[in-house]
Image (cartoon, grey):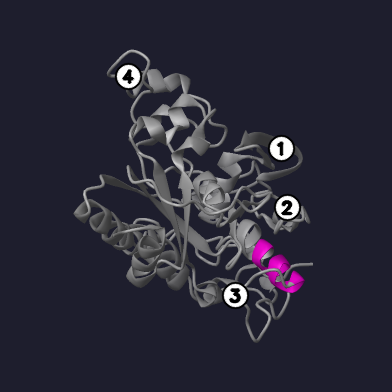
Amino acid sequence: MIDAKTIKQIALEAGADEVGIAPMALWEGAPQQMDPRYAMPRAKSMIVMTHRIMRGSLRGVEEGTYYSSYSAMGYGYINQKVFPWTAREVARALEDEGYESMPLAYHFYGGAINTNDGKTWKSGDGFSVPVREGLPRADVYMSIRIAAFLAGLGEIGYSKVFLSKKFGPRVRIGCVLTDMELEPDPIMPPGTLCNRCLACVRQCPGQAISATKTMKINVAGYDIEWGELNEAGCNRAFVGAQALSGDDDPADGDYLKAPKGFKPSFISPFKHKPDNIHVTGQAICGGRGCMRACMISLENRGVLDNTFKEKFRRRPAWTVDWAKVGEPGAAAPEA
């Protein structure tokens, strides 16, 4: 006889680090285009799993000397390889018992909805159409961060990054929907981990998180609020790019190769953005604000279960002054 305890053990043995369960009824009130019940109408439960990002995978980015570990092992490899295997093992165990199961992950066809604010793109009309009256367009988007919150694994921080009670922001999340009814886990109230210190705001290299404007939603009776995100600024910072100014030489604007007009920013040691690894190998910022700043704050406060012998940040964060590259002092700690 399979039950919640058995399912969690299967997930942990297959590679998950944390497992929580929530009833699908908690999605009541979600926007139609973001309600996973339309993807699997008879689903009764969702099994949500986190896979930790090794703290050591961020070490090379922190030192500015080695980026491949985080880009590959801490980002793309988990999303592309580790979670699919874990989800398959969980789904296989459930379907062996006669319960239909749908694995979900980060990736979906995103043309129908703006995942930043949950609103339907006007251009989405040209992306997909409902196949029946009253249904959302393909693809329905389920926020796995909200799913993890509903499954009791943690909360959504001010940066909109999910914070696990064990690992903080160092997690990737995946989910399996099933038509089996499973015993749910209690929700962790918002504010348990995130104290709105705004370290994420101050240290985001793209200045992409607002300190004053927020997005607020109510989920399962809880208010969840995060800083308004400048998605373009986030995307540029993520890959270590900075738009050329009027004083720059246009010849220097090939950091991204295509499109032109971008140079390396102060958080990138690369003259050109490196090629992808496991699809997502361009994570040059290494979560400088939203992940590392938050992780350091949570660790210093002693609120995470996963603890370490030494502090993560051992010297001031570095920057690169590209105007002085080749001269002494081009790379220096932040003021």
Q: Which residues are magenta?
A: 294-301
Task: Determine the main secondary structure of the stretch shown in magenta.
Answer: helix
Type of the residue with mark 2: Gly
What residue appears at the point 70 percent right and 59 percent down from the top-left corner?
193
131 versus 35 height, above or below: above
Where residue 137 sits, quadrant-wise, is: top left
Q: Provide the residue designation for mark 3.
A: 306
List x then y, in percent, for residue 130: 32, 19
> Could you say which disc has been placed on residue 214 in the image?
1
Q: Provide the residue designation for mark 4.
A: 130
Q: Was residue 295 drawn as part of the magenta stretch in this picture?
A: yes
- Alpha-carbon span between mark 1 and mark 4: 31 Å
> Could you say which disc has been placed on residue 191 in the image?
2
List x then y, in percent, for residue 120: 48, 24
Q: Quadrant of the N terminus?
A: bottom left
- Alpha-carbon span between mark 3 and mark 4: 45 Å
Side of 302 where 28 appears, left or right: left
Q: Is residue 73 visible?
A: yes
Side of 124 where 208 appears, left or right: right
Q: Was residue 87 drawn as part of the magenta stretch in this picture?
A: no
Q: Secondary structure beneath disc 2? A: loop
Type of the residue with mark 4: Pro
Residue reaching furthest bottom?
Answer: 309
What residue appears at the point 60 percent right and 51 percent down from the top-left corner?
187
